Image (cartoon, helix red, strand yellow):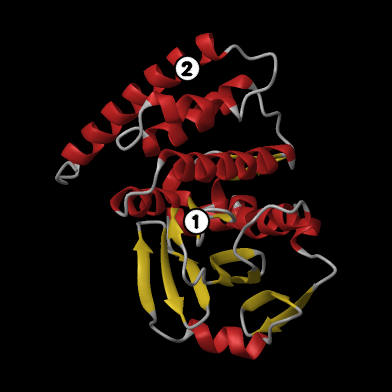
Amino acid sequence: MKGLLCAEDVYVARHGLRKCYVHKGHAKEQVLQALLQPGEVLKQSKKSRVRRVGAYAIKASRGRFGIGLLKHTFQRGRCRRAWIAAHHLRRHGVGVPEPVAYIEKGLLGVVAGSVLVTQYLKGCRNVEQFLVALVQRGAGKDTVALFLAALAEAVNRLCASGAYHADLSGKNIFTRDGKDFYFIDLDSVQLDVEYNDARRLKNHVELYDSFCDLLNDAMLVPFIERMLTPRHDTRIWMPQVRKGQRQRRSKLEVRRDRQGKKRA
């Protein structure tokens, strides 16, 4: 895994306790300066915080001590996954935010934390939001069908690259125009794994769940069908997708109830 950190267009530099892998189109000093800025927090969890600083999206790990320190040190491959996946996917023509830098902070083999810096997807929204906007402005069925067809082709390109995205909900796919798409949350991407039916079904359930509140099966079945191989029978596949979607939604609602969140 370590050797995969570097590519021809990446240089490595040290800065104190930080080891920086930086794309050659960007200066290490500029990236480090951005890390010092508070920026705008876009997303936050117990494991990480994502914020925007100018043209950069910065995802920094959290929990430096105790279990967090052990995970960063002994499971560093998982922390590096997004950086490696971004380069892999770009080489295969798959849309992702441009990887700018990956930085690990540590000493003597102990890793205290990591930061992934990518280009901020200015002017983009996730495909769930994009579809809502299409519907609200009265887009016809043909327009929606073209959007879904383009999205299906983007997903097929992702899967054909030898990558599996384990969280392919619409919230993790961004677009500006409904024609070109960018996959995010690349920590969830696994490389060189078989895209078997179990993984394919999981992805289709995630995508179906993203759109089924707005679109009926007259639109969604052709969408799913575009992501199937000739050996798959839609009449057998779609009942599995619908069942999986109901189970997924039920689990999500239980989780929200536990967290005290209001249902949509």
Q: Quadrant of residue 247?
A: top left
Q: Are marks 2 and 1 in contact (CB under 8 Å)?
A: no
Q: Which mark is residue 174?
A: 1
Q: CA distance from mark 2 to mark 1?
A: 25 Å
Secondary structure beneath label 2: helix
Mark 1: give few (<14), some (14-19) or many (20+) Cα within 10 Å. Answer: many
Residue 6 placement (x, y as % from top left): 79, 65
**Looking at the image, residue 195 lies above or below residue 71:** above
**Amino acid type assigned to the residue bearing label 1 in the image:** Phe
Secondary structure beneath label 1: strand
Q: Earlier in the sequence, mark 2 or mark 1?
A: 1
**Looking at the image, residue 101 lies above or below residue 174:** below
Taking the spot 57% from the left edge, 56% from the top edge, the residue there is: 182
Residue nearest the observer in this picture, 87 or 234: 234
Q: Which mark is residue 105?
A: none
**Amino acid type assigned to the residue bearing label 2 in the image:** Met
Taking the spot 61% from the left edge, 56% from the top edge, the residue there is: 82
* Camera sees residue 163: yes
Mark 2: give few (<14), some (14-19) or many (20+) Cα within 10 Å. Answer: many
Question: Which residue is tagged 2?
Answer: 238
* Camera sees residue 169: no
Taking the spot 21% from the left edge, 40% from the top edge, the residue there is: 256
Residue nearest the observer in this picture, 50 or 221: 221
Residue 231 placement (x, y as % from top left): 69, 13
